[in-house]
Amino acid sequence: MTSMRRASFGTMFRVLLHMQFARLRRSWRPYIVVSAVMPAGIVLLLHLTNTQMSGTERLNIIAGAMLLSESIATIVMLSQYVAWLKVSRALDHYRVLPISLSLLMIALTTVYGLFAWPGVFLIAAEGFWLDHLSLHFSLMRVFHNVKPALRAVSARQENGFPPE
């Protein structure tokens, strides 16, 4: 029996990332609309209906809409796709490949997280343009919340993934 050569973590991750981007090649529009247009519309609606807000309230609304954009894309859409993979038995396809399911989940989370960034930048530009807020400060709030999640993923990678 010959032993199968396992690719490195980076190679497997890159292949999975390309597979997921290829899958989303034709269906990216709903993801962008949901993660960008809806939160930006909420910000615009609040800006137009409540003109007496203070700068702190406006900044909190912008930061909340950015986090809403990120959470809609990564939490809601990702969980729907993973549930579909499980129900349709498409997850069995990935089980026969020489990859861990943890690595697949990291690649899926990365792809869906990247789909949220156009919405984050749109909302930051909207806050800068409508409310004259500092673009740098708005984006730093989002990066501040993303940093612990990235630390958790890297710590999990260093400690090894649990057996599946």
Image: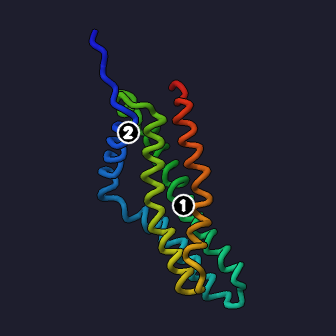
Q: Mark 2 highlights which residue?
A: 10
| Colouring | rainbow
Residue depicted at 61% across the width and 88% down the height: 48
The answer to which image quadrant residue 91 occupies is top left
Callout 1 secondary element: helix
* Nearer to us in this view, 4 or 140: 140
Badge 1, how many Cα within 10 Å: few under 14, some, many 20+? many
Label 1 or label 2, whichever lies nearer to me, is 2
In the picture, the disc for residue 51 is: none
Which amino acid does the dot numbered 1 rest on?
A: Glu
Q: Mark 1 highlights which residue?
A: 70
Report the quarter where the N terminus lies.
top left
Q: Is residue 132 placed above or below 80 in the rendered structure?
A: below
Report the residue that reaches farthest toward the left: 2
Total count of labels: 2
Mark 1 or mark 2: whose residue is earlier in sequence: 2
Which amino acid does the dot numbered 2 rest on?
A: Gly
* Nearer to us in this view, 130 or 47: 130
| Location of residue 148 in the rendering, given as x and y in whole percent from the top left corner | 61, 50
Q: Are marks 1 and 2 in contact (CB under 8 Å)?
A: no
Residue depicted at 34% across the width and 38% down the height: 11
Q: Is residue 37 placed above or below 150 in the rendered structure?
A: below
Badge 2, how many Cα within 10 Å: few under 14, some, many 20+? few
| Left or right of residue 140, residue 83 in this image | left
Q: CA distance from mark 1 to mark 2?
A: 25 Å
| Left or right of residue 1, residue 128 in this image | right
Q: Is residue 83 placed above or below 71 in the rendered structure?
A: above
Residue depicted at 49% across the width and 43% down the height: 83
Report the residue that reaches farthest toward the bottom: 51
| Location of residue 57 in the rendering, given as x and y in whole percent from the top left corner | 71, 79
Residue depicted at 48% across the width and 35% down the height: 102
